[in-house]
Image (cartoon, rainbow, N blue to C red):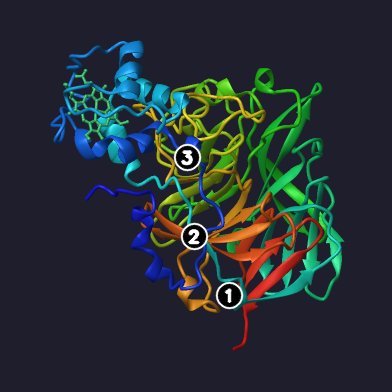
């Protein structure tokens, strides 16, 4: 059934989340809707979504008897077709929306896009379950923690953006690990993510991503090493860009690390502020990469015969959340959009996520970035945040302290200072609620060994546990 309102798609899942206290705190502005949504809301009821049409003829069957050039399409949509039953939308839709729709009708394969879009909610229903959570300071006095992992119940490894790797005991003792690579900390760059090998207890490998500087330029780099005493040892470089692909400036490094069930490693690199390069598989930025843990290339990597055989997906703007869902095996990413159009994506081998050719966002100054929200051959996000939340940090809740939340995603937001609990069903985004707000910009989140939720804020790590009734 075709939903008649954008709320329709989200109506059903809400009882699942048991959110009687839901309220709408953010909803996309009408002119931020993409062409496909505009089509679904205004046109599909008569024209249908496929080549067979509906009560009115299909606009996608190759026959446009009233004209197929942009001007006649716009005129037909704006003024209608007098005696034929086609209403005029001038007044109801803005000029920009009418142009979007006309371009959409001309685009390659609208029915395929509409099909994909049926699972791309444009509107968020966001409520709060923050009253179910108790917040406590866990580790204080850390400086811009970017990533963290638990070595055991009482010990964390924390990266500080400016370049320190700390081992921190819950008693408060902090030890700097000496000998890690020198990082280029400027702008958004620095020491970034840290991850433990899936077989850490046997092999001791620890993985780090960071901004690596070379001749005034920089790029995201990935190494692994071990810790002996307070010393970083046995370092191996697993990914390093070619020198000619280093970029000046301090924007969009990514980067997060996650592993699949077979132990392969995925990591993200942002577009480095060079948006067109996200579409170029000859360069490493604007991509999600996959390697074996020793740096070798998995046999079925989609671009294994190209210059960067580690590339797994492309057209990714700045993914700063990346997690393999242990239940479904679905690889989820969250990525910063420009102004609007932050995305949550299901990452699949060889796919193009469209940046900057398609986007739900606009340029930072509000001007149009692209008229396209969808194109053939490009993936739709599972959902998007417009306005942007500045998505950063992503995990799957796997603990027992909040039994109802098991298997849901935990997504951090820098700009809204909020932590979202996202209901997903396999590769479908269902809906989300806020479980923490106004504590500070959230950089990273993880389920702890004790089942509590740990969140990295600008100068501390806090612990979220259930509030006693
Ligand atoms: C109430 C039903 C209805 C709605 C809603 C509607 N249309 Fe139509 N439209 C029609 C009918 C009927 C025709 C055929 C008119 C004719 O051929 O004389 C038509 C014709 C058209 C044509 C010309 C097709 C051709 O063969 O050249 C275009 C373009 C078009 N519609 C676009 C749209 C768009 C875009 C929307 C949504 C913004 C829309 N229509 C919404 C009923 C509708």
Task: Please provide percent x and percent y for residue 172.
Answer: 84, 72
In depth, the one of 343 and 416 nearer the eye is 416
Residue at 40% in and 62% down: 327
Mark nearer the viewer, 3 or 2: 3
Label 2: how many residues lie within 10 Å, few (<14), some (14-19) or many (20+)? many
Tag 3 or tag 1, which sits nearer the N-term?
3
Residue labelled with disc 3: 30
Tally of numbered discs: 3
Task: Please provide percent x and percent y for residue 67.
Answer: 24, 12
Please tell me whether mark 1 sits on a helix, a strand or a loop: loop
Residue labelled with disc 2: 432
Q: Does the residue at mark 3 contact the one at mark 2 (Cβ under 8 Å)?
A: no
Tag 2 or tag 3, which sits nearer the N-term?
3
Gap in angstroms between the C-alphas marked 3 and 2: 21 Å
Residue labelled with disc 1: 451
For the C terminus, the image quarter is: bottom right
Quick check: can you spot residue 242?
A: yes
Please tell me whether mark 3 sits on a helix, a strand or a loop: helix
Label 1: how many residues lie within 10 Å, few (<14), some (14-19) or many (20+)? some
Task: Please provide percent x and percent y for residue 412.
Answer: 62, 55
């Amino acid at each position: 059934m075709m939903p008649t309102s954008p709320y329709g798609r989200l109506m059903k899942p809400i009882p699942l989340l048991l959110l009687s206290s839901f309220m709408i705190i953010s909803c996309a502005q009408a002119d931020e809707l993409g062409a496909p949504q505009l089509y679904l809301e205004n046109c599909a009821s008569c024209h249908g979504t496929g080549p067979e049409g509906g009560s009115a003829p299909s606009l996608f069957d190759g026959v446009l008897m009233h004209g197929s050039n942009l001007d006649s399409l716009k005129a037909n949509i704006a003024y209608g077709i007098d005696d034929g039953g086609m209403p005029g939308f001038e007044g109801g839709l803005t000029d920009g929306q009418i142009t979007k729709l006309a371009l959409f009708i001309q685009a390659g394969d609208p029915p395929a896009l509409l099909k994909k879009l049926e699972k791309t909610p444009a509107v968020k229903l966001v409520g709060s379950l923050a009253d179910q959570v108790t917040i406590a300071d866990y580790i204080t006095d850390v400086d811009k923690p970017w990533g963290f992992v638990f070595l055991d119940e009482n010990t964390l490894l924390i990266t500080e953006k400016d370049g320190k790797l700390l081992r921190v005991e819950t008693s408060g003792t902090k030890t700097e690990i000496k000998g890690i690579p020198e990082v280029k900390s400027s702008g958004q760059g620095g020491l970034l993510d840290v991850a433990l090998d899936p077989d850490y207890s046997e092999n001791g490998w620890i993985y780090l991503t960071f901004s690596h500087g070379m001749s005034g330029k920089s790029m995201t780099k990935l190494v692994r090493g071990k810790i002996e005493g307070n010393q970083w040892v046995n370092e191996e470089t697993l990914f390093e860009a070619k020198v000619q692909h280093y970029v000046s400036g301090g924007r969009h490094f990514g980067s997060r690390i996650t592993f699949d069930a077979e132990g392969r490693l995925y990591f993200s690199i942002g577009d480095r502020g060079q948006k067109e390069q996200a579409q170029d598989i000859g360069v490493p930025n604007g991509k999600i990469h996959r390697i074996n843990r020793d740096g070798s290339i998995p046999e079925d990597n989609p671009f294994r015969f190209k210059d960067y055989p580690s590339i797994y997906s492309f057209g990714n703007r700045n993914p700063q959340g990346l997690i393999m869902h242990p239940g479904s095996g679905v690889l989820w990413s969250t990525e910063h959009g420009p102004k609007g159009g932050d995305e949550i994506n299901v990452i699949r081998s060889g796919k193009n996520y469209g940046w900057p050719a398609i986007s739900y966002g606009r340029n930072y100054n509000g001007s149009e970035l692209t008229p396209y929200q969808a194109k053939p051959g490009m993936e739709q996000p599972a959902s998007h945040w417009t306005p942007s939340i500045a998505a950063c940090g992503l995990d799957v809740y796997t603990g027992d302290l909040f039994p109802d939340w098991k298997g849901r995603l935990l997504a951090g937001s820098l700009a809204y200072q909020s932590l979202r609990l996202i209901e997903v069903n396999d590769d479908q985004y269902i809906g989300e609620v806020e479980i923490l707000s106004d504590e500070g910009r959230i950089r990273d989140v993880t389920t702890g060994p004790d089942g509590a939720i740990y969140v990295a804020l600008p100068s501390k790590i806090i612990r979220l546990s259930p509030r006693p009734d």
